[in-house]
Image (cartoon, rainbow, N blue to C red):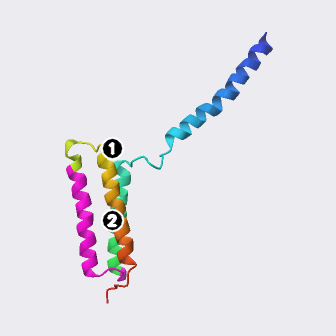
Amino acid sequence: MKIKNSIILLAVLALGVPTFSFAQDHRGGRRENESQGPRELHERLRKCHERIERGVRNGDLTRREFDRLVRELHKVRNDEARMRADGRLSHRETERLERELSRLERHISQLKNNENKRR
């Protein structure tokens, strides 16, 4: 009787443990289409600011390009502040901010790699 119970217990554990760990791993990781949290948004904003500053220092951005990118960065920051006025960001608001940040990152890359250089 003890052997039978032990075999059943081992079978249940053997089948249950992988399922449980898979469920945690699947839920714990961020899916590609999920929106980011506030930390990730702030990190992306910080990186954009650094890339703009580095582009000016290296001469990859002209003064006019720098001004344009800074205006765009401030717009994203102002939009975030306005959206957070009620105390939280909805899923739709977060997605909109992510699109704006992606556009800004694309513009930074395009302007840093164009033919215009500061002299």
Q: Verify whether residue 25 appears in magenta.
A: no
On the image, the x and y values in percent for residue 103 come to 34, 63
Residue 50: quarter of image: bottom left
- Tag 1 residue: 91
Going by the numbered disc 2, the residue's amino acid type is: Leu
Q: Give the structural element (helix, strand or loop) at label 2.
A: helix
Compared across the picture, whether 29 is left or right of 17 comes to: left
Residue at (32% x, 49% y) in the render: 94
Compared across the picture, whether 29 is left or right of 108 comes to: right
- Looking at the rendered structure, the number of numbered marks drawn on it comes to 2
On the image, the x and y values in percent for residue 82 come to 20, 51
Q: Choose the circle earlier in sequence order: 1 or 2.
A: 1
Residue at (28% x, 70% y) in the render: 69
Density class for disc 2 (Cα within 10 Å; few <14, some 14-19, many ≥20) is some
Residue segment shown in magenta: 58-82
Question: How far apart are the alpha carbons under marks 1 and 2?
Answer: 20 Å
Residue at (38% x, 53% y) in the render: 40
Going by the numbered disc 1, the residue's amino acid type is: His
On the image, the x and y values in percent for residue 27 come to 50, 38
- Tag 2 residue: 104
In the rendered image, the vertical position of residue 63 relative to residue 75, given as above or below: below
Q: Main secondary structure of the magenta part?
A: helix
Mark 1 vs 2: CB contact within 8 A:
no
